[in-house]
Amino acid sequence: MMRMQHAGNAQLQDLARGIRQDVVTMAAQGFASHVGSGLSMVDILTYLYWNGLNVDPQQWECEDRDIFILSKGHGSAALYATLANAGFFPRERLSEYYADGGFLPGHPVWRCVPGVEATTGSLGHGLALAVGQAIGQKMKGSSCRTVVLLGDGECNEGSVWEAAMYASKCRIANLIAFVDCNDLQGLGLVREVSSLYPLREKWASFGWRVHEVDGHDFVEIDRAYSEAVPETDGPTVILAKTVKGKGVSFMENKLEWHYKSPSTDQLRQAIEELTS
């Protein structure tokens, strides 16, 4: 399987802007929450689906493919918008997000949508699923990788650290985890609700190779991801510092956008900002 054509920085930025427009539109049309959570991780997803993952939208179930799992499943709008823009299914179907009987459920469901590799949303499970997938790839002698995206608040779940410990023990080098570090979770700041810091040292103490990047800088993301790929002695985690609600001024770093959906006027303003 051939990886998608490499996109340059300017193209990635244009793609991310378009995906963010889709995310806010989907949230408004579906009266859905978690728009801020989706916006924070758009750049990571854009990089992965255009430059990082070895996956073909037209043959996404091919055995010889990289696996991506969105552990923070409440940010599903961003995943769906990315998949649609990458050609996994028609963009017109994004209008069915959160709709009764629609094509796109509020949380990802395994194989319900082309490109969705796991049912997620109950936080703390995605890394364990990714560990299992990566072990399976190794057992088959595959050179493919498993990539998983978690939230920083999600790392309060003990199951995350059980999976992290096991991945290190098994030296699973074909496993890459991103952590979307926007420092906001359902009830407040991560550092105040139940502090995870120092997060770099925690992951390192579990035997992971750790990279820290600006999660909105494609050059930094690419550098960390490229350095992770050749590693042969264990899993890699990329701690991506992000802004919740990125790209929309009145949503950025605002806790309420973990729950609210945009009104008609707010959607209009968001689209104007994302197209300027």
Image (tube, rainbow, N blue to C red):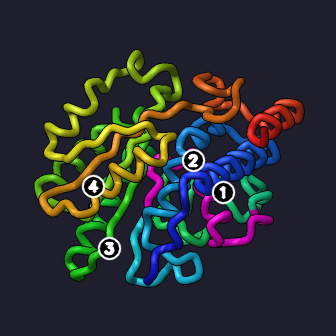
Which numbered disc, 4 or 2, marks the residue closer to the eye? Answer: 4
The residue nearer to you, when weighing 6 against 268, is 6
The mark that comes first in sequence, 4 or 3, is 3
Q: Residue at x 47, y 67 (%)?
A: 117
Q: Amino acid at mark 4?
A: Glu
- The residue to which callout 2 is attached is 42
**Residues at marks 4 and 2, CA–CA distance in whole angstroms:** 21 Å
Residue 249, x across and y down, in percent? 70, 26
The mark that comes first in sequence, 3 or 2, is 2
Magenta stretch contains residue 253: no
The mark that comes first in sequence, 1 or 2, is 2
- The residue to which callout 4 is attached is 227
Which quadrant would the C terminus be assigned to in this image?
top right
**Residues at marks 3 and 1, CA–CA distance in whole angstroms:** 24 Å
Q: Characterize the local packing of mark 2: few (<14), some (14-19) or many (20 or more) Cα atoms within 10 angstroms.
A: many
The mark that comes first in sequence, 4 or 1, is 1
- The residue to which callout 1 is attached is 81
Question: In the rendered structure, which segment of residues is drawn in magenta?
Answer: 68-93
